[in-house]
């Protein structure tokens, strides 16, 4: 059995998986692979699947599966899994780091000092204590973020289409009402037909003037042009994002030139600890596959 590691995983993983078969990172051998391990970079499209003649199992190291054509995979009797539970802490910590960094102007302050500037009077800080954080999407990561925000004395509200109670946030029945009340809005939704472009000109108009938007979910959940315009007009005081329409983003993305942004290159799941957790779950999934295959 050939196991193809198509994207970056922990360096110790190939040795751990070698007991189950041959392990390679040579993408030209995709037609031989029975198991393919991916993260966000590899796109498992219909064409990819058609070229993977021996493929039986796709494992995505991470949360989403929007880079896998799951419908076609099922038609081909190819199993698909992810490691959703592994990334909770890593992504929640990054989201909260961004929430702290935005009103404290950490990135701009650092850059200005390195440029020999002293812009203390220009950088007006605000505190998180007593502010309202609205979390859109109350899965593992959203709830983990809620716990961190409450520790800083924030009021935490949340919206999720099928979550009606949690100890960590006050549930708001509609997304529209949630964003109206929020000083900070953090996105933790998968990219689905219903969530694509869900943050757009219409929904942004409902935001508080001067609210902050944080996105560690999926780049496609916002309309980039509308967010950039909201930043230029001051409707949004800031936007922090770790996710893009493509990795890396198109150089023409309006977010890259918009004011008051904090930009990261899809670091959310890339902590050392999380890569080890992902590798452990991948090994468990493959061990189970091999056991049940016999």
Image (cartoon, rainbow, N blue to C red):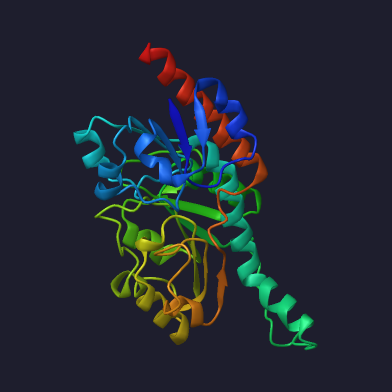
Q: Is residue 208 above or below residue 196?
A: below
Query: Where does the image place residue 133, in percent across and percent down from the top left?
Result: 51, 58
The residue shown at (30%, 56%) is 195
Please determine whether, in this image, residue 242 is positioned above or below residue 82. Answer: below
Q: Specify whether 288 is left or right of 128.
A: left
Residues 150 and 62: in front is 62
Instruction: Residue lying at the far left in this picture: please name it.
Output: 75
Q: Position of residue 169 (x, y in %)?
A: 48, 46
The quadrant of the picture occupied by the C terminus is top left
Q: Is residue 217 left or right of residue 117?
A: left
Q: Quadrant of the N terminus?
A: top left
Residue at left offset 65%, top offset 53%:
152
Q: Foreground residue, 204 or 166?
A: 204
Is 206 above or below relative to 221?
below
- Classify residue 275 by image quadrant: top right
> Residue 187: percent from the left, percent from the top?
44, 57
Q: Residue at x 46, y 24 (%)?
A: 286
Residue 258, image x and y in percent? 49, 81
Q: State how many labels appear.
A: 0
Q: Nearer the viewer, residue 265 or 110?
A: 265
Q: Left or right: where does residue 282 sit relative to residue 74?
A: right
Nearest the viewer among 32 and 95 is: 32
On the question of residue 83 being in view, the answer is no
Q: Is residue 58 visible?
A: yes
């Amino acid at each position: 059995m050939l196991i193809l590691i198509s994207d970056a995983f922990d360096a110790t993983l190939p040795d751990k998986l070698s007991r189950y078969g041959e392990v390679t990172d040579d993408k030209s051998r995709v037609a031989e692979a029975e198991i393919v391990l991916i993260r966000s970079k590899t796109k498992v499209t219909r064409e990819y699947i058609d070229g993977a003649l021996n493929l039986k199992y796709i494992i995505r190291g991470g949360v989403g599966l929007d880079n896998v054509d799951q419908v076609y995979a099922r038609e081909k009797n190819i199993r698909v899994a992810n490691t959703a539970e592994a990334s909770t802490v890593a992504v929640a910590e990054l989201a909260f780091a961004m929430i702290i960094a935005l009103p404290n102007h950490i990135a701009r302050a650092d850059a200005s000092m390195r440029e020999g500037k002293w812009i203390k009077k220009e950088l007006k800080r605000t505190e998180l204590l007593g502010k309202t954080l609205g979390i859109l999407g109350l899965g593992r990561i959203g709830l983990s973020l809620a716990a961190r925000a409450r520790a800083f004395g924030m009021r935490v509200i949340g919206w999720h289409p099928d979550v009606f109670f949690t100890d960590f946030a006050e549930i708001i029945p509609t997304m529209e009402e949630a964003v109206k009340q929020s000083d900070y809005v953090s996105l933790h939704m998968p990219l689905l037909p219903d969530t694509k472009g869900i943050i757009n000109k219409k929904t942004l108009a409902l935001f508080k003037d001067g609210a902050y938007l944080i996105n560690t979910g999926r780049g496609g959940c916002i309309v980039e042009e509308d967010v950039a315009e909201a930043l230029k007009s001051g409707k949004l005081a800031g936007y922090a994002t770790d996710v893009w329409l493509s990795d890396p983003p198109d150089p023409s993305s309006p977010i890259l030139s918009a004011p008051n942004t904090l930009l990261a290159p899809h670091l959310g799941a890339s902590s050392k600890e999380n890569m080890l957790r992902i590798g452990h779950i991948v090994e468990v999934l493959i061990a189970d596959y091999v056991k049940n295959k016999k």
